[in-house]
Image: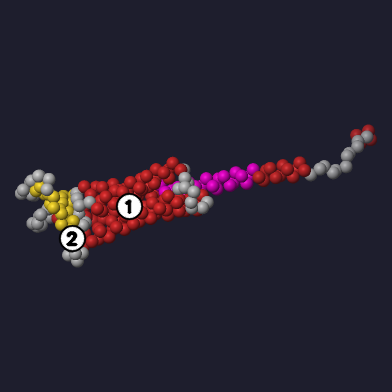
Amino acid sequence: MLGIQIIAFIFCFCGLGAAIAATASNEWKVTSRASSVITATWVFQGLWMNCAGNALGAFHCRPHLTIFKVEGYIQACRGLMISAVCLGFFGAIFGLVGMKCTKVGGSDQTKAKIACLAGLFFILSGLCSMTSCSLYANRITSEFFDPSFVAQKYELGAALFIGWAGASLCIIGGIIFCFSIAENSHSTRRGYAYNGATSVMSSRTKVHNSVPDKSPPKHFDKNAYV
């Protein structure tokens, strides 16, 4: 039980770190080398900055100065990724409290419920991150395969794959956390039934042994067999 919770927490913690890295990364989309005329120069964009670099190693980044000029899908992805990070942060706190190796959180049943709540937070975090990366990737692929789109075409950046991997880890770890409460309640119920049966049998045995036999002794003579 404890080992399963530790594995789930490691999954969720790694997924949360991947979500933070994807949110801060500027490589959500990169210029396509196939459509670029100058192959020694490339452009990569993220949720917060647009950057350009060349083969000499020089980079220049320009942040989005105003939120009102940013496209709608970028703002939606920002909100989803921030929500994923916040949900994962609260899920990590509840996960630490709900683990059996910690001394806070109350009884085992209470800690199991807290662990289940942490699992729900991690699942929601993974879904938010998955939705954000999928929405951004859908926009990139739709522009890339659109023959009427004449502007600069981009390809999927490394941040999208990091976000997908982190979202998968958060969802898997959250599911494991949620199943831990079912395993805990099953083991508690089974132990209670066994102890109850033992106590009942032992009490009956004690009562039977403690009650003296007050029935009068029976004397048989030879006329009783006639």
Q: Residue furthest left?
A: 37
- Separation of disc 2 and disc 1 at Cα? 26 Å
Dominant secondary structure, magenta: helix
Horizontal placement of 62 versus 90: left or right?
left
Give residue 175's position: percent from left, percent from top.
Answer: 39, 49
Q: Which mark is residue 225?
A: none
Query: What residue is disc 1 on?
Result: 126
Give residue 146's position: percent from left, percent from top.
Answer: 12, 55
Which residue is located at x 31 percent, y 49 percent?
Answer: 17
Please identify the quadrant where the C terminus is shown. top right
Q: Which residues are magenta?
A: 176-198
Give residue 216's position: percent from left, percent from top.
Answer: 88, 42
Horizontal placement of 180 versus 146: left or right?
right
Which residue is located at x 28 percent, y 47 percent?
Answer: 165
Which callout, 2 or 1, points at the residue further toward the start of the chain?
Answer: 2
Q: Residue furthest top?
A: 222
Q: Which mark is residue 64?
A: 2
Residue 170 visible, this orientation: yes
Which residue is located at x 91 percent, y 36 percent?
Answer: 220
* Nearer mark to the viewer, of 2 and 1: 2
Taking depth in this image into account, of 131 and 118 the one nearest to the observer is: 118
Taking depth in this image into account, of 178 and 53 the one nearest to the observer is: 53
Which residue is located at x 25 percent, y 58 percent?
Answer: 77
Which amino acid does the dot numbered 1 rest on? Gly
Give residue 192's position: percent from left, percent from top.
Answer: 58, 47
**SS of the residue under disc 2:** loop
Which amino acid does the dot numbered 2 rest on? His
Residue 34 visible, this orientation: no
Marks 1 and 2: in contact by CB < 8 Å? no
**SS of the residue under disc 1:** helix
Taking depth in this image into account, of 13 and 154 the one nearest to the observer is: 13
Horizontal placement of 78 versus 148: left or right?
right
